[in-house]
Amino acid sequence: MRDSDDNTSPGRRQFLQCMAWAGAGTLWLMQGGVLRAQALTGQGARDAADASFAFVQISDSHIGFHKAPNMDVASTLRASLAMVNAQKVRPDFLLHTGDLTHLSRPDEFDALAGIMQEARVDKTFYVPGEHDVIGDNGAEFFRRFGERQQAGGWYSFDHRGVHFVGLINVLNLKAGGLGSLGADQLAWLKMDLAPLSASTPLVVFAHMPLWSLYPEWGWGTDDSAEAMGLLRRFGSVSVLNGHIHQIQQKVEGNITFYTARSTAYPQPAPGVGPAPGPMKDVPPEALHRYLGIREVRHVRGSQPLALTDEVLS
Amino acid sequence: MKALRYAAIMSMLCLCCGVAMPAVAATTDAAPKAKAAGTQVEIRNFAFAPNTMTVAVGTRVVWTNRDEEPHVVTSAGKQFASSPALDTSDTYAVTFTRPGTYAYYCSIHPMMVGTIIVQ
Ligand SMILES: [Cu+2]
């Protein structure tokens, strides 16, 4: 399967959804801006051997949720971390792209922090989801999981030649709108990227999709186009999001957008059913096929990142 | 193609999502047993129903969340206090004592908007 333009064709979009739903692990290889999907086989092992480093994205653990289709989201998060621990190549760090908790409650944050200690990684980077900032604009989230670089909570770091940017798009949301970055964050992003050469590989991550994935369900960010304008000059940009509890992807020039599975429960494909709530009819024995983690390998000297999405079973 | 068959199966499953499940019983600290007195707004499928409501001065409006997803009732112009996170079956009540148009939304799903007109 090749992907060289946007995601507007319903047929192609449907096919990608199928890949996510099919349950078998899918290896994403991004080569020269072209994405290829393969089943998880020996190919993955070969690429792992070549990789300079790997990191893993997890998302939407929703600690505190206890309804159909998942009465025990702590267990499925644990299973996800066990999968991280079982990777052949030890990831340098984890990215958690938000909705750590379901209701922003202190006991939920406590439980999440405790479970995350089971991951055998040196460091986990977090960005909040809208479920993590209820009632206090994220004060508790940032106190526990923030990087404390900027007052607004956004941050960046460099890792082995790759520039990572963590953005916040779940605060100060306007009535009738989508996710929001805001003028302050965009001004900071411009300054943050200014000194970088266009050949620096970028990984940008935030909770809500940074592209207009399905605005009817709020799946997008109002001012994402301004951020993309700042990213366009770079040769390799990977944008990682959570929020929609399923894999969707899109290529726009040198920018490739990916959303991740949840470790807690799946949500329906865009426009399927009346609303984007949990897919509560997934039978327990099938649930693991909808949940999972994403491993990303960066191969030094070649721009593409290799993404591997793995389901829990 | 095998993958397309999965899509077909999943589409069928999703159609079932619209069938309401009995909500898990939950109490609320916001407005326990508010049902008896007040005008109801249901929150269902990420929408406020009725979306716009006209009430008399002094009316107690009670929102009840029927979704599995939490929602937060928030005044668009800070005209009344925001609800806490409303989990499934939680309710929140506001008594409107002055005439006016009160636009509100869900602070975590901002595409959810509603209006209370107080006369
Ligand atoms: Cu909401």
Image: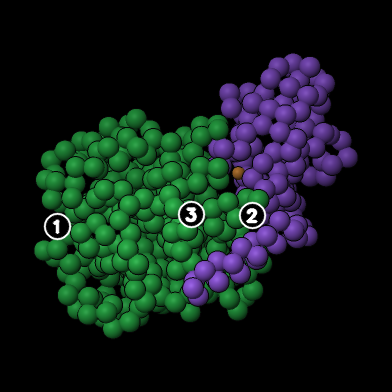
Query: Which residue sits at x=23%, y=36%?
Result: A190
Q: Is residue A164 visible?
A: no
> Where, by quadrant of the figure, is residue A55 drawn?
bottom left
| Dot 3 or dot 2, earlier in sequence | 3
Q: State the separation of the CA atoms marked 1 and 2.
A: 43 Å
How many numbered callouts?
A: 3
Query: Which residue sits at x=68%, y=51%?
Result: B67
> Where, by quadrant of the figure, is residue A217 drawn?
top right
Q: In the picture, one chain is purple; tell me its letter.
A: B
Query: Which residue sits at x=65%, y=66%?
Result: B13
Q: Amino acid at mark 1?
A: Gly
Judged by depth in the image, the label closer to the viewer, 1 or 2, is 2
* Residue highlighted by disc 3: A10
Are the two marked residues, 3 and 2, in contact with CB atoms closer than 8 angstroms?
no
Q: In the picture, one chain is green; tell me its letter.
A: A
Disc 1 chain ID = A
Q: Amino acid at mark 2?
A: Gly
Q: Amino acid at mark 3?
A: Pro
| Dot 3 or dot 1, earlier in sequence | 3
Are the two marked residues, 1 and 2, in contact with CB atoms closer than 8 angstroms?
no
Query: What secondary structure is marked by label 3?
Result: helix
How far across and down, in percent of the image, does residue A192 sit? 21, 40
Circle 2 residues within 10 Å: few <14, some 14–19, many ≥20: some
* Residue highlighted by disc 2: A273
Q: Is residue A86 left or right of residue A100?
A: left
Judged by depth in the image, the label closer to the viewer, 3 or 2, is 3
Q: Quadrant of ligand 1?
A: top right
> Where, by quadrant of the figure, is residue B24 drawn?
bottom right
The label shown at residue A161 is 1
Circle 3 residues within 10 Å: few <14, some 14–19, many ≥20: few
